[in-house]
Amino acid sequence: MSEQRKQPATTDGKLSSDEIYFTNVFNVHRAVLAGFARCSDLEELRVVRDGFFLAMASDLCPSEYGPVHRRIVQDPAVADAAGTSDSFATTVISARKSPVWTNLLDALQAKAREVGSDLDGIWLTLETGRIEWLAAVSGAHKIKSMLKSGLENQCGGGIPAEGDVSDAKMIWMYALSLSLPGLKEEREAWQKVVQMSDPNRPLVGYRAELWDCREDQWRPLDLGVQAAAERGGSSVAEAWDVALV
């Protein structure tokens, strides 16, 4: 999530004063951008995006930000939502309704271009990573529920054996990979190792002795799924423990 510049503004490779200021502003509002990791759909993601742009503009584009800010503070809906979980989204929605909202966005993008920063590209990377991960988690939710139920039944409601949990997670991680297009080769290699009869249903003809995490072909698939989780603002461990992350 680092602030990205296409090229330095000075010939000696040092950052210009404008670049330094832009980077500092970016870092100040990094926490807003990190909110992408809590989003559950595209609409929520776009709220975070626009909230980040609004925050950046408050420092970089004060002239364009002023009228938008005045509309926000005069909006009864914003006042009503103060102190609630809806406060951030309500503020962003109010800002979008300002007649000069697009002026603010244009001014911010102009500032970014001046220092070679691709704000849209930075955001698109986060948004794409989150959407892909949510799709993977959703697609593998049914098999995760089946696996967890099986573990509970197997241990009679107690704590399942570590090895059994590890085996279940391997199956689930494979299921996650089915929704991750970048892992096609890794997935197909693993299908051959475990002699999978139906690539979309890993439990059909499942042979536990073949699902060995020490096999060379497992590591690329394992790391690929973990990387997808990180791009989505989550982790494999977190996704195993909760419904959607």
Image (spheres, rainbow, N blue to C red):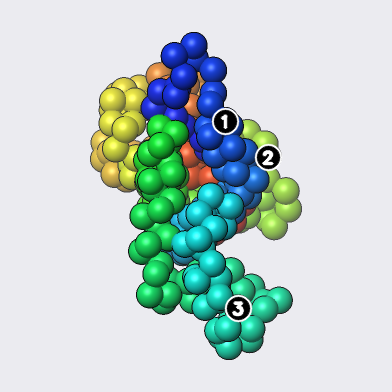
Residue 59: image location, x then y, percent: 58, 52
Mark 3: amino acid: Val
Q: Which one is nearer the viewer's eye here, 101 or 81?
A: 101
Residue 184 visible? The answer is: yes
Residue, x 52% and y 32% (percent of image)?
Answer: 19
Q: Earlier in the sequence, mark 2 or mark 1?
A: 1
Q: Earlier in the sequence, mark 3 or mark 2?
A: 3
Depth check, mark 3 against mark 1: the one in front is: 1
Crowdedness of circle 1 by 10 Å Cα count: few (<14), some, many (20+)? few
> Which of the 4 quarters of the picture holds residue 83?
bottom right
**Residue marked by disc 3:** 73
Q: Which one is nearer the viewer's eye here, 31 or 45?
A: 31
Q: Which one is nearer the viewer's eye here, 8 or 154?
A: 8
Mark 2: amino acid: Ala
Mark 1: amino acid: Ser
Residue, x 43% and y 51% (percent of image)?
Answer: 108
Answer left or right for 196 relative to 101: left
Answer left or right for 91 relative to 93: right
| Secondary-structure class at tag 1 | helix
Residue 179: image location, x then y, percent: 33, 45
Residue, x 44% and y 14% (percent of image)?
Answer: 11
**Residue marked by disc 1:** 17
Find the distance from the CA under tag 3 to the CA under tag 1: 32 Å
Q: Which one is nearer the viewer's eye here, 238 or 216?
A: 238
| Secondary-structure class at tag 3 | helix
| Secondary-structure class at tag 2 | loop
Find the distance from the CA under tag 3 to the CA under tag 2: 56 Å
**Residue marked by disc 2:** 161
